[in-house]
Amino acid sequence: KQEVTQIPAALSVPEGENLVLNCSFTDSAIYNLQWFRQDPGKGLTSLLLIQSSQREQTSGRLNASLDKSSGRSTLYIAASQPGDSATYLCAVKVPREYGNKLVFGAGTILRVKS
Amino acid sequence: NAGVMQNPRHLVRRRGQEARLRCSPMKGHSHVYWYRQLPEEGLKFMVYLQKENIIDESGMPKERFSAEFPKEGPSILRIQQVVRGDSAAYFCASSPIALEQYFGPGTRLTVT
């Protein structure tokens, strides 16, 4: 059974810091891995999607890496801003033969202080 | 191209009533997924549907919960005889041919 863990559960940093959010998963048989952002009381915004054959993806100040063999992914946020404050969710997509569903971690609550 | 639509956005039900949550997938998407987010928890998969078929309902409680995705119209998640523990945010996602899932804004159900 696939399980996803995110560390830390919460993080508070001053504006301008570079930071790393961690995600680990127990079964390396994944189709892809996705990072989402969720603002309080809102839906999910997809940030980055890494296919199982890829090692990393970049979008602006965000960079996500994937090491499938060790079951780990990191989300790197450069030069953090108060507007980055949100909950960040990591999710892995199980292979089609297991139903195509996403398995989510519990999230990291990020607060960037101005 | 409008995104995934969910309605209502907020729903309040008394214990014992029925809750109906609707999800209209993005145009051209024939795959729908429902997830539930309990307070202070991550999202949990409930059910995966294609038009007129339930593909995987392994995450759905065996009693009181049902889902459908008819040939015409939105997907419906139905909760009968709601209890306080059903209070949560329910998210719908859609995808074309089982590729990347796009999420709706969610329906926040409160059971009083």
Image: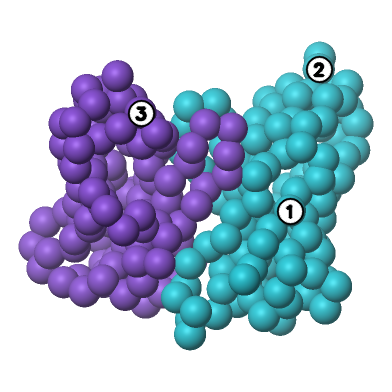
Residue at 82% x, 30% y: name it.
A11
- Check disc 2: other Cα within 10 Å, few if <14, some if 14-19, many if 20+: some
Q: Residue at x 29, y 68 (%)?
A: B49
Mark 3 = which residue?
B84
In terms of sequence position, does the residue under pointer 2 or pointer 1 come before the other? 1
Q: Colour of chain B?
A: purple
Chain name for mark 1: A
Q: On residue A113, which mark appears? A: 2
Expressed as whole percent of the image width and height from the top left, the position of residue A8 reads 82, 40
Q: Are marks 3 and 2 in contact (CB under 8 Å)?
A: no
Q: Chain of mark 3?
A: B
Q: Amino acid at mark 2?
A: Lys
Q: Numbered disc 2: what chain? A: A
Chain identifier of the cyan chain:
A
The answer for how far apart the CA atoms under marks 2 and 1 are is 25 Å
Q: Which residue is mark 1?
A: A5
Name the residue at 65% across, 31% down: A86
Any part of residue B102 in sight? no
Q: Describe the element under mark 3 as helix, strand or loop.
A: helix
Residue B101 vs B18, above or below: the answer is below
User: Tag on residue A46?
Assistant: none
In this orientation, which residue lies closer to the viewer: B99 or A61? B99
Which residue appears at 16% of the width and 72% of the height? Answer: B52
Secondary element under disc 2, as helix, strand or loop, is strand
Q: Amino acid at mark 1?
A: Thr
